[in-house]
Amino acid sequence: MGDKKVTLKLDNVSKVFAKVESDEVTHALYNVNATMESGEFISLVGPSGCGKSTILRLVAGLIMPTLGKVTVDGKEIEGPEPNRGMVFQKPTLFPWLTVERNIAFSLEMQGKLKGNEDKVERMLKVIGLERFKDDYPAQLSGGMAQRVALVRSLINEPEILLLDEPLGALDAFTRMNMQDEILSMWADTKQLALMVTHDVDEAIYMGTRVLVMDANPGRIVANIKIDEAFPRDRSSAQFVEYRNEILNKLHFGGKHNA
């Protein structure tokens, strides 16, 4: 990825989905504006149905906005590209390929594997799975499989890393370890990371900013800069203050802030 900086913009973005069973429509997003840059780790939090994953899918180029535009360095996104890598909640690995072949798959498809075999080896070392390189996904634990899915996206060195609740299916201890692994990889690459999570503590622990969303229609209601150095202390007074601020914005703090 080098030192190239990118700027991602959502400019007055609205997204409407038609309901199959009626003439009604769902306003997934309404008039969303946001600017994000390389080196940021943006956490998106909010209730189900507020459009968090819709934003990720728009940035990935999997869907198009109904109104407004999504741009990278001023160029409108028109579809998926290797410079935007997406990691889903479930690992979505190819069950018929080994760990090593899963990691190498995208390079192979782009005709870039030859001469880049050392990259695959390096990624195996990063996630500590050299001993499991010839194993198949069914032989891996959930945490191991998710690590493979992560580096499979990272091996392309995407300028923008999209994470759709990537740790939601993991147990608490594996989840905290994986949070640190993702942050370590992100710190090395300095790319823009955009993560959807339902876990407020995770959003604060990993994010340089937290965008708080509300539903009906989906919109951003707060943009909170997390001004704490990494690694963060989950029990610090500042951390607890951020948590209370976000919970209040989500109407779970015992009082409703404007």
Image: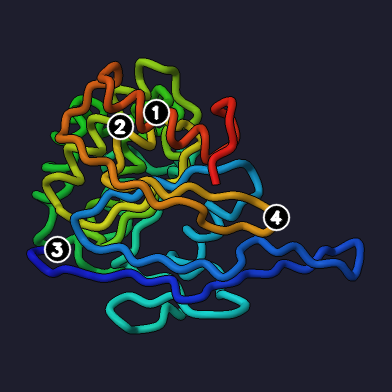
Pointer 4 residue = 216
Q: Which residue is mark 1?
A: 201
Disc number placed over residue 205 in the picture, else none? 2
Reply above or below: 252 against 182: above
Is residue 204 rendered to the left or right of residue 212?
left
Say above or below: 240 vs 83.
above
Mark 4 falls on what kind of element? loop
Q: CA distance from mark 1 to mark 2?
A: 6 Å
Asked whether 104 or 163 is in front, the reply is: 163
Residue at point 52%, 40% (across, down): 249
Q: Are marks 3 and 1 in contact (CB under 8 Å)?
A: no
- Seen in the picture, residue 189 relative to 233 is either above or below; the reply is below
**Residue type for callout 2:** Tyr
Say few, some or many: other residues with alpha carbon within 10 Å of mark 1 (under 14 / 14 to 19 / 20 or more): some
- The residue shown at (43%, 26%) is 142
The residue carrying pointer 3 sits among few (fewer than 14), some (14 to 19) or many (20 or more) residues within 10 Å by Cα, namely: few
Cα–Cα span, label 4 and label 3: 38 Å
The amino acid marked with disc number 1 is Asp
Give the image quarter of residue 75.
Answer: bottom left
Along the line of sight, which residue is nearer the eye, 190 or 47? 47
Element under disc 3: loop
Mark 2 crowd level (few <14, some 14–19, many ≥20, 10 Å Cα): many
Q: Looking at the image, which residue is at 33% across and 69% down?
A: 8
CA–CA distance in space, label 2 to label 3:
25 Å
Identify the mark nearer the N-term, 4 or 1.
Answer: 1
Give the secondary structure at mark 1.
helix
